[in-house]
């Protein structure tokens, strides 16, 4: 089985490359922007038609949340139109399309974990572009899996954990918002979940939407506190409100995802966020096993 993965240099793409080395039963092909310009729809179509995958896992996209407020057309192209093209090609070439989406499609005003069928109401341009991608899949694809995730981090690329570790070595105190609640997702755990979906791809007959993050619910403040405590870093974490740390794009105040569907459909056990954080800190060399 031939698996094409886009976004090979991103956090999730790198995680998939890492664990795929132990999977000899599938032929994995990883590509990124140096292999094809994702803003060129004809080039994207040409590469996919040439490879003829059995499964396409789309980890690529526009991820600069604040910058999307100034570049909504580019965000819409990469997160909406390109995804629609991939979905249409999945119908034409008869492959399974697995697409990674986000908690930002929701407005963050809920008081209980979001289910897959809850109504969209994204306040940010980034969130709206991700909604476009999902809607295009529902229109264009026949067999597809949409996986929404949140607060992704890993030993690679730019993410909250690495930023906190870097800043903690420069400052004695850091202010972190305590009024935004969600769940971190360790990229390796999400990659393993995607692998499980791939291994059970024969069961997927139509379009399915799933949520995946680690277990539990915390604030960014709680997350930062745990990083410092586990890594034994002497840096005071000060709780602040969102308005004290303004960003161009609005953030959801609550984005906990209900993961019952993916756990039931794939008999999946999801790690607790703090256990996965420890694994990440070990991988970064911040703590020992």
Image (spheres, rainbow, N blue to C red):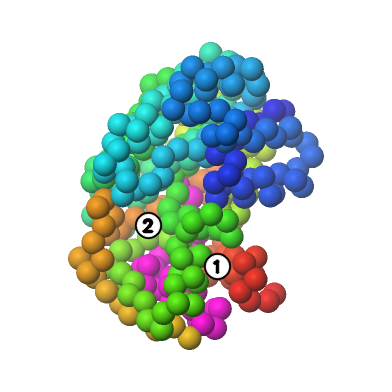
The residue indicated by pointer 2 is 256
Position of 51 relative to 200 (above/below):
above
Quote the CA–CA distance across marks 1 and 2. 17 Å
Residue 3's quadrant in the figure? top right
**Residue 242 vs residue 172: left or right?**
left
Circle nearer the viewer, 1 or 2: 1
Residue shown at the point (37%, 81%) measured from the top left: 173
Residue 231: within the magenta? yes
Position above or below: 284 against 84: below
Q: Identify the residue shown where x is 32% and y is 46%.
A: 67
Q: Is residue 266 visible?
A: no
Q: Quadrant of the N terminus?
A: top right
Q: On residue 41, which mark appears?
A: none
Disc 1 element: helix
Tell which of 96 and 2 is nearer to you. Answer: 2
Task: Quickly name the residue at label 1.
Answer: 277
* Residue at 58% in and 21% down: 48
Tags 1 and 2 touching, CB below 8 Å: no
Can residue 36 be seen here?
Answer: yes
Residue in the foreground of this view, choosing between 51 and 257: 51
Q: Secondary structure at mark 2?
A: loop
Identify the magenta region.
211-233
Q: Residue at x 41, y 32 (%)?
A: 78
Residue 63 counted in the magenta span: no
The residue nearer to you, when weighing 183 against 19, is 19
**Residue sitting farthest toward the left:** 243
């Amino acid at each position: 089985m031939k698996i094409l993965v886009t976004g090979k240099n991103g956090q999730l793409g790198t995680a998939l490359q890492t664990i795929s080395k132990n999977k000899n039963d599938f032929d994995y092909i990883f590509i990124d922007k140096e292999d094809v310009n994702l803003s060129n729809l004809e080039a994207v179509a040409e590469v996919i038609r040439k490879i003829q995958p059995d499964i396409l896992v789309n980890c690529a996209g526009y991820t600069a949340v604040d910058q999307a407020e100034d570049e909504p057309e580019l965000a819409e192209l990469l997160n909406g139109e390109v995804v629609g093209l991939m979905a249409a090609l999945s119908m034409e070439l008869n492959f399974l399309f697995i697409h990674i989406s986000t908690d930002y499609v929701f407005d963050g005003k809920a008081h209980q974990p979001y289910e897959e069928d809850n109504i969209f109401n994204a306040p940010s341009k980034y969130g709206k572009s991700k909604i476009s991608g999902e809607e295009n899949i529902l229109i264009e694809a026949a067999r597809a899996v949409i996986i929404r995730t949140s607060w992704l981090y890993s030993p690679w690329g730019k993410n909250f954990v690495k930023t906190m570790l870097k800043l903690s070595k420069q400052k004695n105190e850091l202010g972190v918002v305590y009024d935004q609640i969600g769940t971190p997702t360790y990229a390796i755990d999400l990659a393993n979940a995607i692998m499980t979906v791939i291994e059970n791809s024969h069961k997927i007959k139509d379009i399915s939407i799933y949520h995946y993050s680690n277990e539990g619910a915390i604030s960014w403040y709680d997350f930062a506190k745990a990083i410092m405590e586990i890594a034994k870093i002497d840096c005071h974490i000060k709780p602040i409100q969102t308005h004290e740390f303004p960003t161009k794009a609005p953030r959801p105040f609550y984005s906990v995802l209900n993961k019952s569907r993916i756990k039931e459909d794939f008999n999946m056990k999801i790690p607790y966020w703090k256990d996965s954080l420890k694994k990440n800190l070990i991988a970064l060399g911040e703590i020992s096993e």
